[in-house]
Amino acid sequence: MKNIRQKTKAVRAGQARTPEREHSDPIFATSSFVFTSAEHAAEMFAEREIGNIYSRFTNPTTRAFESRLAALEGAQYCSGTASGMSAILTLCMSVLRSGDQIAATRGMFGSTVNLFCNILSRFGITTSFHSPSEICSAKLDSATRMIFIETPSNPLCEIVDIGQLAKVRDSLSDCILVVDNCACTPILQQPLALGADVVIHSSTKFLDGQGRAVGGAVVTNDENLANAVHGFLRTAGPSMSPFNAWIFHKGLETLSVRMKESCSSAKKIAQWLQNHPKVENVFYPGLKQHSGHELAARQQSDFGALLAFEVHGGKDEAWKLIDSVSIFSVTANLGDAKSTITHPASTTHSRVQESDRKRMGISDGLIRLSIGLEDVQDLIEDLQLALNSI
C-alpha cells in the first residue's frame, strides 16, 4: 500500500477483512471486547499485548478509518476523535502545560479562537495571534510550544507558507507546527510533507462529504506525539464512535472525485462573483488577485471548495441575500455535497469580540460559501436571484 497513489489509497487503505470475507467494511458496534482468560486481560491492560480492549480507545472500525486517513496524509499515526474541536483540545491537552504559549494565525474558525482564548487561558496557556502574512517573520517567544495555523483559513481563505513556518519552528526549542487541513483535505494539500508535525481534521466536513456525522482526527509521524494523544484519549475519552468512523471511512472512498468537482465549481463561482457590481470583494485563492494565489498554487494541488465575498450594506444586505437563496442551504456547516451559505459574523465567529473580528477582516457584509456537487450553473443562477434582492 505504500507505493499506491492517492485515489487508490482512499478506496483500499485501512481495510482488514474478517474471516467473513466481507467486501465492504463492517461496523464493530460494541463497547467492549472479550478476553480468552484472566491472564490475557491483564496482558492487554498492561499493554504487553496489542489488541482490542474497550471502544473508548480501541475499536476495529475506528482503526480502519484512522489507517486510511493516515495513508492519505502520508502519516504513520492517526487518532480519531469525537469532533474537530475535540481533536484540537486533545492535542493541546496532550502536549501543553501551564506557562506554554501558542502562536496562531488570525482569521481562524471562531470556535478555535474561543478554545485558545477563553478555555486554555484558564490553565495558564496563552495565545498570540498574527496575520497569515506576518507569522513567518514574527518574533515568537521562547515559551512558544505550538504554532497553529489554518491554511486556507475559514472564512477568508488566507494562505500560510507551511514550509517557511517549519523553519521558524526549527528555530524554537521544543515547538510543534500544527496545520488544520480541513479546507483542503489530504487530496489537495500534504502538510506533513511540507514540514508540519501534526495535521488536524474535522472529519465532519469534506472527509464525510454528506453532513452525516461529527468527528475529528489528529495525524502525525511523531511516535511520542501519537502516544501522548492516545494516552489522553484513553483516559479522558473524547472518542470517535464506531458508527461515525464507518461513515468517515466510506466517505474517504469518494473524497478525490468530490473535491475535484467542488473545486471546479468554486472557481467558476468566484470568477463570476468578482465581476458582479453588487459584490465588493471576493476571497478565493484560485483568483489571481488573491494575496495567497501563488503560494496556494505551490503548496496545494487545487484551490478548494470554500470561498467568501462581501456585499455593500453590511449585515442587513448580507442577511437579505442569504434569506433569498433557494438552492444553497443556510447552515454553518461546510464540506457537504449540498452547497451551504452562512454569515460568519453572526454565526461561526459570533462569539469572537467585534474588535477582533474587524482585525481578522471578518466584516458584517461577509458571506461564506461552501460549494457542493450541484450543477454550477444552478448555483450561479441562485446567487444571481439573491443578489437581485439587495
Image: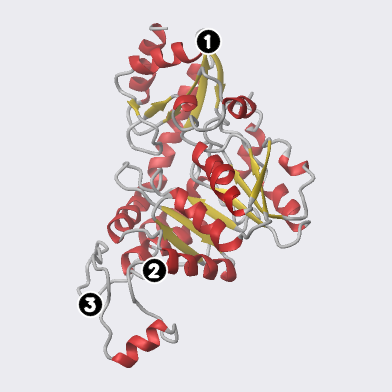
Count of numbered labels shown in the rendering = 3
User: Which residue is painted at 50% across and 29% down in the image?
Assistant: 307
Foreground tag (3 vs 1): 1
Q: Quadrant of the C terminus?
A: top left
| Mark linked to residue 312 | 1
Q: Quadrant of the N terminus?
A: bottom left
Q: What residue is disc 2 on? A: 57
116 left or right, relative to 330: right
> As rendered, which of 61 and 112 lies closer to the eye?
112
Near mark 2 (Cα within 10 A), the count class, few <14, some 14-19 or many ≥20, is many
| Corner quadrant of residue 22 | bottom left
Residue 74 seen by the camera: no
Asked if labels 3 and 2 touch by Cβ distance under 8 angstroms, the answer is: no
Image x and y of residue 16, in percent: 33, 71
Image x and y of residue 304, in percent: 50, 36
152 left or right, relative to 374: right
| Scheme of colours in the image | secondary structure
Mark 2 element type: loop
Query: Which of the two labelled residues, at mark 2 and mark 3, occupies the earlier sequence position?
Result: 3
> As rendered, which of 142 and 68 lies closer to the eye?
142
> As rendered, which of 19 and 389 lies closer to the eye?
389
Mark 1 element type: loop
Instruction: Determine the CA span between mark 2 and mark 1.
Output: 50 Å
The relative height of residue 102 versus residue 333 in the rendered view (above or below) is below
| Mark linked to residue 233 | none
Q: What residue is disc 3 on? A: 19
User: Which residue is painted at 56% across and 29% down in the image?
Assistant: 353
